[in-house]
Amino acid sequence: MTEAFRSLHLVPKAESPQSAKDFKTDQEVRWCPGCGDYAILAAVQAFMPELGIRRENTVFISGIGCSSRFPYYMNTYGMHSIHGRAPAIATGLAASRPDLSVWVVTGDGDALSIGGNHLIHALRRNVNLKILLFNNRIYGLTKGQYSPTSELGKITKSTPMGSLDAPFNPLSLAVGAEATFVARTIDSDRQHLQSVLRAAAEHEGTALVEIYQNCNIFNDGAFEVLKEPATRDEALVRLEQGRPVRFGADRGVFRGPDGDLYVDHVTEANEAQLLVHDAHRPSPATAFALTRLADADTLHHTPIGVLRDVHRPVYDTLMAEQLTRATTEQGAGDLAALLHGSDTWTVA
């Protein structure tokens, strides 16, 4: 975490170096054997000491779902809260306590179904939160119903003839909600996962990280094409700031005359036209086009990495400035006078 960011948000440094062990609790980790959540938990616990923030100034807030057990296993402050409401609770905490590093852990069902409105409003406000959205394209905790990210035609216990719902694209949703930081990574790629977490932690404002997470019991192999050595290089588009976007043996991403992005073979004739990745573009158009690059069913041409990382005033800071200005200009507030002001009346 940069010194400027830590100073801005008044998050105290740890007094001595910390290790991954310091962030592990004495609670038995209880997910299904082989669940991708184990890999994410281990990566986060190993990553947190890098931030140099005291555990007492770190908070993990979750909603309801398999991923929402996360706070039990992080030796920090935490709250296992209400279904879909983690961003709302975290917003109140982040806005009132600038000395805390606030993280939200949620799932595709928790965040995008009952919690959809809370998520998009946290994103548009640019609250100082880091949101980790575990996407396994299924409801795992309730034993295998289709979720808001399940593909069209998905056969589950609640859709025996196939889902009729068009799935949400979480990153398209985030860019459309004016999120200032949008990224995607994979549970099994620890190095990439931690690099994205690092970038999210350094971002000022809301950072949304979608993590493709395998549910080996109810939706096993959902992201196999992105993980198997035989297919991943041709399916994964690894985004690197300032670098031409190319992948596989000879594939690249280009911009068409209509502004859309497309994939083609790279040749000497078209190499100069390769899209150069710039997550800091003020316009969200290219970031949105990147979110639409992958086919929802096959996942071919799936971008991973930081798609968007731009600066916008942080909600918490703006609110603090308003409070300071109001106190300076108007003096201390009078709650009784506010409650019994000119807009109240007595009913006989």
Image (spheres, rainbow, N blue to C red):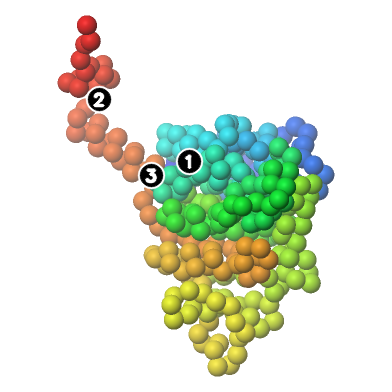
In the structure shown, which secondary structural element does the residue marked by tag 2 occupy? Answer: loop
**Of pointers 2 and 1, the one earlier in the residue sequence:** 1
* Foreground residue among 118 and 297: 297
Q: Residue at x 82, y 44 (%)?
A: 33
Q: x and y percent of residue 70 in the render?
A: 66, 39
The amino acid beneath tag 1 is His
> Which label lies toward us, 1 or 3?
1
Q: Counting other residues with Cα less than 10 Å from the Cα at mark 3, is it few (<14), some (14-19), or many (20 or more)?
A: many
Task: List the residue tagged with mark 2.
Answer: 332
Task: List the residue tagged with mark 1.
Answer: 118
Q: Residue at x 34, y 38 (%)?
A: 320
Kindly give the residue lying farthest to the front in the view shown. 161
Q: Residue at x 39, y 65 (%)?
A: 283
Classify 138 as above or below 328. below
Tell me, yes or no, if residue 116 can be seen here: yes
Mark 2–mark 3 Cα distance, whole angstroms, equals 22 Å
The amino acid beneath tag 3 is Tyr
Kindly give the residue lying farthest to the bottom in the view shown. 269
Kindly give the residue lying farthest to the top in the view shown. 348
The amino acid beneath tag 2 is Ala
**Of pointers 1 and 3, the one earlier in the residue sequence:** 1
